[in-house]
Image: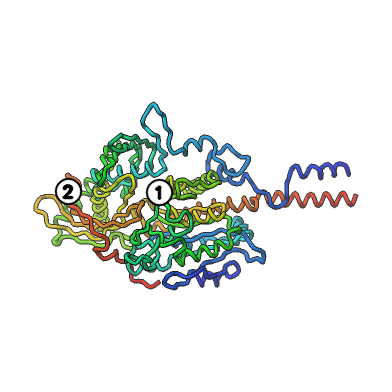
Amino acid sequence: MNLVTEQYKDVVTQDVLGMTYENQTINYLKIGEKSDKPKKVIWMDCGIHAREWISPAFCQWFVKELLENYKTDEKISRFFQNMDFYVVPLLNMDGYNYTWMENRLWRKSRSPSPVSNCSCFGTDLNRNFDASWNSIGASQNCCSEIFCGSKAESESEVKAVVDLVGRIKNDILCFLTIHSYGQLILMPYGHPNKTAPNHDEHLKLGQNAANAIKQKHGTSYRVGPPSQILYPNSGSSRDWARDIGIEFSFTFELRDNGTFGFKLPEDQIQPTCEEAMAGVTTIVEYVHNKQFGSAAAATVALWSTVLASYLSLLVLVQ
Amino acid sequence: MRWTLWIVLGLFPLIDGHPTLKTDQNSLETADAALNHQNGSLNSVLHLDDTEKAALETTRNDPAFPMKELNTSHYPATRAAKVAQHYLNYHHGSPFKWFMVHAVKKASSEDIPEVGKKYHIQFSVQEQATKEIVGNCTAEILFRHTEVQSAPEVNCTCDDLLKIKTSDADHALYHHIKHQPEPMTGMDIPDSHGNIPKEMEPFWYLGGIGASFIMWQQSNESTLYNMAHVHSVKQLNSENDLLAFEYVVLLHDMVSQEIIHWHMQVAWNPTQGVKVTQCHLLPKGTLKQPSAEKHKI
């Protein structure tokens, strides 16, 4: 991350998001043309579940794609002018480390149990957000893989996200969180009784993203709220982001469908990242254009202004 | 001349609005068209048209018939299809033939009072080694609503299942194993990075087929199982013409997110297929966790 920040210091800043339980520093990258004025933001976090190794791999791919192409790709160039990408390449660092050193299939954080008669470690970070916390699809058993913690935001990793996103929420156009596996694009909400006010727009946008993914390598992704297409759940970061007013919020569950599951082999990393990139770009482009207008409209508007000014000048001169 | 100019200037606001921050409602519709996506509504941000809304409804209840049409991308249909996959694999799989659900095409369910719920699924499967798609599978899956877990009852047929011929490969493997001086063993398939040595692939498949039996037996409407890992495989002595193996496999249940450890004994030969002769659940924490690379980050 330091190398990237150094090499692309014109457009990249690295900052501290917070600390993990084991006192590791969680860093994030802020990527875009530097500006004095506040800019709109696209948020992406990876590696919230330790065993989902393709997720932090995708964040790295995403950053690479942006930085290798922002000078030559007109679309990305516009994104960089108007927005900043906030990317957290690896949120659950303690858990990820544990998957390398001890248990490849670890999911949760590595904080000790808050419950005295329960000796297991870890809270499911994606059940620990304050979004219908502990209502459904989560467990109060500290040994469960979906243990949601003793209270919402008990985990320092979650607190770190909440602090920053909460501060800049009015600027965030879209919240993206990357997981595996399942080949899904999930939208709010996990709770079966909750529907987002812009549900239809989310669904359509998600479907467009899934279409873009399919065009890349033929991979099928399903789209919908988890309460319908996966399982009811609560306390997720995606739902919390929507609840605090971020207009668009998606979870990506990347490849595969269960053959390799969490252990996606090396030869699938690049195609998975390429197709996910296509899906994410579809979403980013939509939310960008909704805010700033498309390039075509901007060009027409610009030339119209120029022509109007010229004609006004002629009139004055007459 | 002057009047013409004034008229043109006057007409400008009608042609163009605010010069800078206009929301382009058409941007995603343009993307839609480029992606061959049908869309009728162009006058605002993304809306589902009535056809799309109907397709996405969870259920359609027709009081005259007890069958409920299910949305094929919703989890009741996908979980039932996964059970059919496990059933199909156990009955037709081999060290060279392992199916995954490819797409659910049609799904419906009916409540059977005092018994449970029966699902009717039409789906396609893809064979993992050859990547061949078997397009026409139908299954009936009955989940009995019992106090303790009971295996779902499955009827499943696919047209063209026999087009995937693995007989030669099966026999070659069988003879190869029979003539080895030492019984085979293996561990951690795949490794942490998803790698599987080529010679281990048939034993990964065999583990997957044996695990399919367990996953079928353990499934209900609140589970979705996949095999996450073969912890160990060891060839056992066998006097008859069946080869026998002892496996420890790790299963992942998507709904609870739990990793469940099972010990099983699997018998196989090319003509009789795969049979799980024994299996039992291992308590959490019995065995050392799947080894990971000892790398420093």
Up/down of A97 relative to A270, above or below: below
Q: Residue drawn 58% across and 55% down? A: A173
Answer left or right for B84 relative to B12: left
Q: Secondary structure at mark 1?
A: loop
Task: Give percent across and percent down for residue B186.
Answer: 23, 61
Q: Secondary structure at mark 2?
A: strand
- Quadrant in the picture for residue B250: bottom left
Task: Give percent across and percent down for residue B118.
Answer: 31, 37
Outermost residue, right side: A318
Residue B287 seen in the figure? yes
- Residue contact at pointers 1 and 2, CB within 8 angstroms: no
Up/down of A41 relative to B270, above or below: below
Q: Which mark is residue B269?
A: 2
Task: Give percent across and percent down for residue A240.
Answer: 50, 56
For the image, the number of numbered tags is 2
Write down the chain letter for disc 1. A
The amino acid type, in three-letter code, at marker 1 is Tyr
Residue B1 seen in the figure? no
Pick the front one: B143 or A53: B143
Outermost residue, left side: B239
Write down the chain letter for disc 2. B
Q: Nearer the viewer, mark 1 or mark 2?
A: 1
From mark 1 to mark 2, how far is it between C-alphas?
A: 39 Å
Color encoding of the figure: rainbow
Task: Give percent across and percent down for residue A197.
Answer: 55, 46
- Quadrant in the picture for residue B74: top left
From the image, tell me which residue sits under label 1: A231
Label 2 CA crowd tier, 10 Å (few <14, some 14–19, many 20+): some
Q: Which mark is residue B168?
A: none
Q: Residue drawn 39% across and 44% down? A: B75
The amino acid type, in three-letter code, at marker 2 is Asn
Outermost residue, front side: A116
